[in-house]
Image (cartoon, coloured by chain):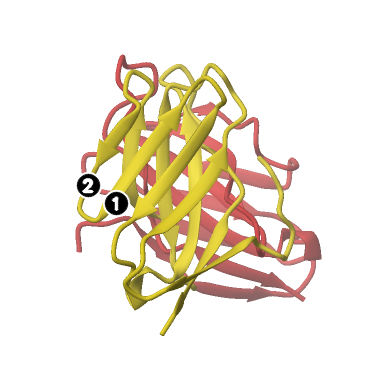
Chain colours: A yellow, B red
Amino acid sequence: GESVGLHLPTLSVQEGDNSIINCAYSNSASDYFIWYKQESGKGPQFIIDIRSNMDKRQGQRVTVLLNKTVKHLSLQIAATQPGDSAVYFCAENNYRDDKIIFGKGTRLHILP
Amino acid sequence: GAGVSQSPRYKVAKRGQDVALRCDPISGHVSLFWYQQALGQGPEFLTYFQNEAQLDKSGLPSDRFFAERPEGSVSTLKIQRTQQEDSAVYLCASSFTPIGQESTDTQYFGPGTRLTVL
């Protein structure tokens, strides 16, 4: 997996604004993509997923966009709340393989 | 609760000691995974079980790491002769379907065990 060391990229967003977290994935054979949220001291929590036959999927307050041409994934969080503060990881997988490959994490910081 | 549980949540070991980390997957989940997460990084795959069969152990960093799932439910990750570089959070995840099915299934993670080797 990719390593970001001790210094995660940080996105600071005003409470109530929309957040956009971007991710570049590595394997063109991946056909399943997931966003996980990880709060301090907890395991990764599933947020939303998308399969490669789609380019957009919406959940509650979250939208994932997939651009297979440039191998780019984004997570949009609407009306960001203090409880959204966490590290967000994109991840890729395919049904022929077992391991999820996690991308670089992004720390989302909510400004009051 | 119905989620993945892990114990202990925290483990401190002296260098050279053996440790055993337990994972209770979601009931009925066929697939079980172990990941290692170093500080400030994303989780990295260690090993995969389908029921009691360990089908992939390519991510285990050395032969000091051993995992088992003898009855196809609870799994134990054992680390022998711990070293300082083994300090990390060890995450367990489970999913309902086996790998290789036409549709990939979501992996659900437990809270992890934070291992500190002194």
Q: Position of residue B46 (x, y in %)?
A: 60, 41
Q: Quadrant of residue A54?
A: top left
Which quadrant of the view contains residue A107? bottom right
Between A24 and B29, which is closer to the camera in this rendering?
A24
Looking at the image, do the residues carrying marks 1 and 2 touch, with CB atoms under 8 Å apart? yes
Q: Which mark is residue A35?
A: none
Label 2 marks a residue whose chain is: A
Q: Are marks 1 and 2 on the same chain?
A: yes
The residue sitting at 56% across, 19% down in the picture is: A28
Dot 1 lies on which element?
A: strand
Determine the residue positioned at 24% across, 56% down.
A61
Q: Please tell me which residue is depicted at 31% across the width and 14% down the height of the picture.
A: B102
Q: Using the image as rendered, state which of residue A1 and residue A60 is in the foreground.
A: A60
Three-letter residue code for mark 1: Val
Find disc 1 in the rendering and name its residue. A62
Q: Which residue is mark 2?
A: A59
Q: In this orientation, which residue lies closer to the viewer: B28 or A58?
A: A58
How far across and down, in percent of the image, does residue B83 sit? 79, 62
Nearest the viewer among A50 and A22 is: A22
Residue B98: image location, x then y, percent: 34, 25
